[in-house]
Image (tube, rainbow, N blue to C red):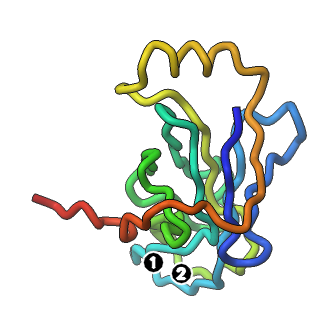
Amino acid sequence: MKVKIKEIIEGCFPKRVGGDKSDAIDLILGETVTLKKGEVYVARLGIAAEMPKGMVARVYSRSSAPSKLGIGVANGLGFIDNIYNGDNDEWKCPLIAYKACTVEKGTRVCQFEIAPSQFATRWQKIKWLLSSRLKLVRVEELGNKDRGGIGSSGIK
């Protein structure tokens, strides 16, 4: 199963640390951020992606981020559906600072997994089950309409 990745900020292509042994894929901070204790900041992750139909990405904090970096994912779990797939639909992550800190560009700050959506068809779920493994494919452009960024669907 292939996930197309457009690297918007150089050096932000996701990494599967630990090779085939890692179950999650790390996301890279696309900018240096300095945060005050308790501050929430929506950080750039420097990529846009197109997932297979019926799949979603779930973004989690890395287990070492709170103790080593002083940050975590503010909303606990980020959810990126497969219609957020335009060339400028950059993945971002709301970070919360547990202490005053500076986190450098290029730091692995969160991780994601790809899984079937609750609305995936039976065929999409079967394709997922029968796929040999997930493959991240670097592309120059995704060629899809931009959705407009985090929060583009509004709050009401």
Q: Is residue 147 left or right of residue 100?
A: left
Q: From the image, which quarter does the N terminus lie in?
A: top right
Q: Is residue 87 left or right of residue 96?
A: right
Q: Which of the pair 18/115 is nearer the observer? A: 115
Q: Does the CB distance between marks 1 and 2 fall below 8 Å? A: yes
Q: From the image, which quarter does the C terminus lie in?
A: bottom left
x%, y% of residue 83? 42, 50
Callout 1 amino acid: Lys
Q: Which residue is mark 1?
A: 37
Q: Which residue: 51% across, 72% down?
A: 88
Mark 1, other Cα within 10 Å: few <14 / some 14–19 / many ≥20: few
Q: Which residue is mark 2?
A: 100
SS for dot 2: loop
Q: Which of the pair 62/79 is nearer the observer? A: 79
Q: Which residue: 70% across, 39% down?
A: 2
Callout 2 amino acid: Ala
